[in-house]
Image (tube, rainbow, N blue to C red):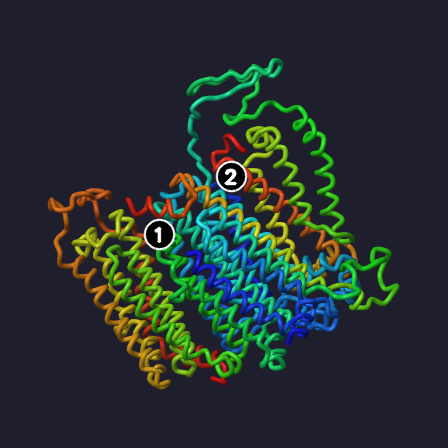
């Protein structure tokens, strides 16, 4: 352990990569091993990333030279407090969701276990690599790994999933290509691909229109990938038709990691000076975010199916983080970063709960949810905790990040953003209390002749979700409250120090 | 202005070609109705970016980046950077080509699945079927 | 949609066109990409890695980590096609078609029926079959070994001439695909099965990642091939060259296997029964 610790930055990526390869091979040789390889790989990475976060708290920044080559020539990994934290969140969510969905995966893909788990672990590998890397082009390669596996994880669902997956592929490829083109412009002007190196060369090109274009291209690419409002069209279909096991990891992580990458690009590549002071984009971006929040909330109100409604909540949440970030004052940026963390765990918890419900009743129409509190009390309790957090009720963590965001909005004098946040909280309250009301007060639909057409099992059989799923669900719900309680520590020990002093 | 524009075109016509190619691909992706045509458009778009990168590697008066007499042992002669073109964009584009091939494979697999499900690859017909359901 | 598309394309295109005004001239030896990072590669690569082909040196060593994930991308695409398309339940085909080889007469056997396997003078053909073509089959049979040797040459000679794992791997895969096209999918699967392609695909990437991990175990950074010097019995610079060869072989294996795997799944829509 002692002599491996300098290699931690590489290990967090390499261990899951090798685990994915072994998983895939095991799918052909001994199918029972697949799950163990995948779980072991992700768990090791979770431990390693926790160790990494612990050491980065004293050391500030950890650099790792891949291949032993120094910075602008080789590829450098750069772990600081912020991405150390994001890495822990990624592996925590991926591992929890993997354990929770063990049974659904075994039932949906009995013959293709190796393939599914390998795709799953590769997806997580790609995301964590994107977060850890310090090389702009390496980020593109890892982005494509997580995207390609993501398309497949979505396309294997039923109903409209293949079509939704194909549309996601088109949008995703445009997004990634625009990012690649942006990096190309940067390369053409600076001749470098290393993030720190580009940032140090950049002041010489501040006035150049090519830099502005490069910035716009990179950002547009990332906006498509994170489904910011006018570019969100791919998300609802892609997310609502995919299998629970894949959506449980894709929904919490994809958009959040893309937002982290946006933060990384603006801070570490384009430097805060250029991104905030010279581009004059802040105002536009915040209004876009306001539109995203309001439209996401309104669309969510119009849905009658649980998973689909949640996808629109995700779109609104993206608006929170983008808006908070582009407000550009310390309070709001802290809120945005904190919300990445909180929202990832909230989304995991709510999708796990929805997954448990869908698994038990084989449907997610609001009609199907009647009387569920009596049949599945524990799952619905966890659902309620996640819902409270999404609404922003203390002591759940959702309250604290929203508090920072709103204070930031007030500090910046941007009342449009504040109003949008409050409006969205109100809408979330309406949305979730409607579901809780259906689940709690309305009698279970058995014996009613009104809508007898259920494709699920008969009402008598519905009971609590399997133990493994429940345990993970409860852990996620508890961590929402724990995150809320330790908000102060996270902000003062990690986030405050991670945001550059220029803001 | 006119002369400037002309000399600009004359010295950077490669980038203009890239922009045109990229726009052809993008237009196909947005406006075409057939899914396979969209996939082709996507490929054109990616290829344009590959050409852009490879253009940045060019150096007048330089040759391909394989060191002459390199295999007869090293250190015999001094190598000047100006004699060989920049190898880095070629390396990057090897990666991008592989990525675009991989994306093409997945896109075609999804298209095959869509075709089996709806019996057509025309987007408006698929949308019509979904509405009628 | 067309008008929207046209508007987007015109707006975006003119934005890019505007950007081009400020680009350095094409082929300008004083442009930043030619001056900043790349001169180090050109001037030092041969002293640091003993590989004259700079593209290979940068690909497999300086930016070897990118290349490992590049191989992973291909592997992920193979996995994705397998997960999306593969139908593992065996369906009994409507009918089977057989050709009597000496006479060329076609037999059609209805649902479920099969010719006994020992009847060696019959061969099964696809339902959308084309007439037996001696020229195509003999030519592909004749070309295949040369193609395979050329592929191995391209992989092995990547240090000194244009080539390397990806190019060679694709040629190797193409040789198998050509066989599958000119004969039929079943015969190709009999020779190189699906399991073999899938396992070889992951084994190829594993060779790459494993080499990197071995360097790590030996105390250097991940993928720092210099650490292999002791194992290979050469000096650290030569060890880099050999390390690159090892990973290029891994890449070649992975790429060729995955290309074949993707072809199997795409051409038969995952049924692995009748191909193109």
Q: Which chain contains the residue that carries disc 2?
A: C
Q: Nearer the viewer, residue C243 or B65?
A: B65
Which x, y percent locates residue C67?
63, 57
Which x, y percent locates residue C77?
53, 48
Taking the spot 28% from the left edge, 72% from the top edge, the residue there is A392
**Residue reaching furthest right?**
B76
Tell me the quadrant of the picture where the N terminus of chain C can be found.
bottom left
Which x, y percent locates residue B31?
45, 54
Taking the spot 55% from the left edge, 40% from the top edge, the residue there is C263
Vertical placement of residue C36 versus C243, above or below: below
**Badge 1 element:** helix
Answer with left or right where residue A438 lies relative to residue C238: left
Which residue does the numbered mark 1 point to in the structure image? A244
Which residue does the numbered mark 2 point to in the structure image? C265
| Residue C205 visible in image | yes
- Name the quadrant containing residue C179: top right
């Amino acid at each position: 352990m002692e002599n491996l610790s300098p290699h931690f930055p590489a290990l967090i990526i390499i261990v899951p990569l090798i685990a994915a390869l072994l998983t895939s091979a095991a799918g052909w040789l001994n199918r029972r091993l697949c799950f163990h390889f995948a779980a072991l790989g992700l768990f090791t990475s979770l431990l390693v990333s926790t160790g990494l976060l612990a050491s980065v708290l004293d050391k500030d920044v950890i650099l790792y030279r891949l291949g032993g080559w120094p910075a602008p020539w080789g590829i450098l990994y750069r772990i600081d407090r912020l991405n150390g934290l994001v890495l822990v969140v990624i592996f925590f969510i991926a591992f929890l969701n993997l354990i929770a969905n063990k049974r659904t995966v075994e039932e949906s893909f009995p013959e293709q276990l190796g393939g599914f788990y390998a795709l799953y672990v590769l997806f997580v590998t790609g995301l964590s690599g994107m977060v850890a890397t310090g090389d702009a082009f390496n980020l593109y390669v890892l982005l494509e790994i997580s995207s390609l596996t993501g398309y497949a994880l979505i396309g294997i669902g039923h109903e409209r999933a293949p079509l939704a997956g194909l549309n996601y592929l088109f949008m995703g490829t445009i997004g990634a290509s625009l990012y690649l083109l942006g990096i190309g412009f940067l390369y053409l002007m600076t001749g470098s691909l290393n993030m720190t190196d580009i940032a140090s060369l950049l002041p010489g090109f501040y006035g150049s229109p090519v830099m502005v274009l490069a910035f716009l291209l990179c950002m547009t690419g990332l906006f498509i990938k994170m489904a910011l409002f006018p570019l969100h069209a791919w998300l609802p279909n892609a997310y609502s038709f995919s299998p629970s096991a894949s959506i449980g990891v894709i929904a919490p992580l994809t958009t959040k990691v893309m937002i982290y990458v946006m933060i990384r690009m603006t801070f570490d590549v384009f430097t805060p000076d250029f991104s905030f002071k010279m581009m004059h984009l802040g105002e536009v971006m915040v209004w876009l975010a306001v539109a995203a929040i309001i439209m996401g909330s309104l669309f969510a109100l119009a849905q009658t199916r649980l998973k689909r409604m949640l996808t629109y909540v995700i779109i609104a949440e993206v608006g929170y983080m983008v808006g908070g970030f582009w407000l550009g004052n310390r309070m709001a940026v802290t809120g945005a970063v904190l919300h990445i963390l909180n929202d990832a765990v909230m989304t995991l918890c709510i999708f796990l709960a929805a997954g448990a419900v869908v698994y038990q009743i084989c449907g997610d129409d609001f009609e199907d949810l009647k009387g569920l509190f009596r049949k599945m009390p524990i799952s619905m309790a966890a659902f309620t905790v996640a819902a409270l957090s999404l609404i922003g009720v203390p002591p759940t963590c959702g309250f604290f990040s929203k508090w920072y965001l709103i204070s930031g909005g007030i500090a910046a004098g941007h009342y449009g953003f504040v109003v949008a946040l409050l409006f969205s909280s109100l809408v979330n309250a309406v949305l979730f209390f409607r579901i809780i009301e259906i689940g709690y007060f309305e009698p279970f639909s058995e014996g009613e002749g009104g809508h007898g057409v259920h494709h699920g099992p008969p009402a008598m059989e519905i009971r609590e979700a399997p133990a493994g799923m429940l345990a993970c669900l409860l852990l996620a719900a508890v961590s929402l409250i724990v995150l809320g309680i330790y908000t102060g520590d996270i902000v003062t020990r990690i986030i405050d120090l991670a945001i550059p002093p220029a803001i | 202005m006119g002369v400037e524009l002309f000399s600009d075109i004359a010295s950077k016509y490669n980038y203009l070609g890239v922009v045109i190619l990229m726009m052809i691909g993008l237009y196909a992706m947005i406006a075409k109705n057939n899914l396979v045509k969209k996939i082709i458009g996507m490929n054109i778009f990616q290829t344009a970016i590959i050409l852009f990168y490879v253009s940045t590697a060019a150096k007048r008066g330089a040759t391909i980046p394989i060191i002459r007499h390199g295999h007869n042992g090293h250190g015999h002669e001094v190598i000047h950077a100006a004699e060989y073109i920049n190898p880095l964009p070629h390396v990057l584009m090897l990666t991008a080509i592989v990525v675009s091939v991989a994306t093409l494979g997945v896109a075609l697999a999804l298209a095959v699945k869509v075709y089996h499900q709806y019996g057509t690859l025309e987007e408006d017909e698929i949308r019509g079927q979904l509405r009628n359901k | 949609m067309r008008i929207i598309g046209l508007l987007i394309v015109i707006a975006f295109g003119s934005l890019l066109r505007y950007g081009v005004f400020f680009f350095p001239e094409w082929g300008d030896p004083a442009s930043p990409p030619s001056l900043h990072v790349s001169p180090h590669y050109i001037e030092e690569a041969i002293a640091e890695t003993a590989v004259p082909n700079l593209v290979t040196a940068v690909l497999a060593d300086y930016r070897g980590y990118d290349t490992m994930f590049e191989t992973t991308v291909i592997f992920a695409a193979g996995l994705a096609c397998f997960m999306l398309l593969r139908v593992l339940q065996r369906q009994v085909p409507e009918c089977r078609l057989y050709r009597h080889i000496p006479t060329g007469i076609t037999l059609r056997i209805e649902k479920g029926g099969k010719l006994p396997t020992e009847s060696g003078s019959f061969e099964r053909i696809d339902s959308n079959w084309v007439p037996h073509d001696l020229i195509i089959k003999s030519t592909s049979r004749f070309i295949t070994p040369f193609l395979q040797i050329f592929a191995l040459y391209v992989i092995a000679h990547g240090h000194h001439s244009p080539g390397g794992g990806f190019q060679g791997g694709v040629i190797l895969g193409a040789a198998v695909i050509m066989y599958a096209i000119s004969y039929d999918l079943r015969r190709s699967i009999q020779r190189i099965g699906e399991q073999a392609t899938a396992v070889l695909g992951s084994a190829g990437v594993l060779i790459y990642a494993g080499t990197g991990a071995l360097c790590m175990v030996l105390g250097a950074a991940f993928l720092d091939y210099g650490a292999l010097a002791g194992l290979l019995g050469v000096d650290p610079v030569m060890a880099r060259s050999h390390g690159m060869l090892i990973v290029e072989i891994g890449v070649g294996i992975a790429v060729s296997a995955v290309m074949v795997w993707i072809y199997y799944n795409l051409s038969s829509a995952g049924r692995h029964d009748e191909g193109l």
